[in-house]
Amino acid sequence: MTRTASITRNTKETKISLTLDLDGTGKAEVRTGIGFFDHMMEGFARHGLFDLTLTVEGDLHVDTHHTVEDTGIVLGQAIQEAVGDKAGLARYGHMILPMDDALMLCAVDLCGRPWLSWDVSLTHERVGSLETETVREFFYAVSYGAMMNLHVKQLSGLNDHHIIEGAFKAFARALCLATRKDERVTGVLSTKGVL
């Protein structure tokens, strides 16, 4: 059984097409119109060992907000669809990941309840053409689209590029662990019997 999802979302602000394979090898084809965001999404795929195809046409003449947030919504929906009923999944994943001066913590619970805890301090308005305030919006949208608990915490770091990249890579590794099959788990990993 393949654990893939393809989502299309068209609004007056963005047109998004995304395909995600949780059991990939880290291949990515990404075009969002925002160079640094492309780099982050490619890193997400590579370090999570997910195959990702993503095309976004957004209203970048306004700003980067809608493109980044709506991509988060669609990625979250793809994650939720690809994990299916979550039977046999590890459910939890966490990573403490170094990125030069930055040390980032990410923890994921595929529990069916959305929550974002964001403890990250960014000091510049932009990295490349990406508005840094949109990074939190991306992770918020992912957590709600995927119905997951998502905690991102900056343990150290001075350089916004490294902090943001560390957050994306830590999320990728944590999600990779949470979506892995565990042969010891029968049904879903919950005393309720459902996630």
Image: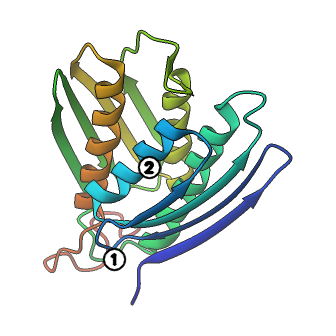
Q: Is residue 133 above or below residue 94?
A: above
Side of 98 relative to 188 (left or right): left
Could you give the CA–CA distance between mark 2 and mark 1, rounded to whole angstroms? 27 Å
Looking at marks 2 and 1 on the same chain, the residue that comes earlier in the sequence is marked by: 2
Residue 133 is situated, as x and y percent measured from the top left of the image, at: 54, 21
Q: Residue at x 37, y 71 (%)?
A: 86
Report the amino acid beneath label 1. Answer: Ala
Q: What crowding class fits label 1: few (fewer than 14 Cα within 10 Å), some (14-19), or many (20 or more)?
A: some
The residue singled out by tag 1 in the image is 87
- Residue sitting at the far top: 123
Horizontally, residue 91 falls left or right of residue 9, namely left
Q: Residue furthest right?
A: 12
Q: Position of residue 64 (x, y in %)?
A: 65, 32
The N terminus: image quadrant? bottom left
Residue at screen point 21% across, 46% down: 94
Please name whichever residue, 29 or 136, is drawn nearer the observer in this view of the structure: 29
- Label 2 or label 1, whichever lies nearer to me, is 2
The local secondary structure at tag 2 comes to: helix
Which amino acid type corresponds to the residue marked 2 in the rendered image? Met
Read off the residue under disc 2: 41
SS label for mark 1 = loop
Which image quarter holds the C terminus? Answer: bottom left
Nearer to me, 171 or 59: 59
**Labelled pair 2, 1 in contact (Cβ < 8 Å):** no
Give how far across and how far down residue 112 sits, in percent.
Answer: 46, 56
Q: Residues within 10 Å of mark 2 (few under 14, many from 20)?
A: many
Q: How is the image coloured?
A: rainbow
Vertical comparison of 124 with 103: above or below: above
Residue located 16% across and 37% down the image: 96
Residue 74 location (% of width, % of height):
60, 55
Choose top left, top right, bottom left or bottom right for residue 88.
bottom left
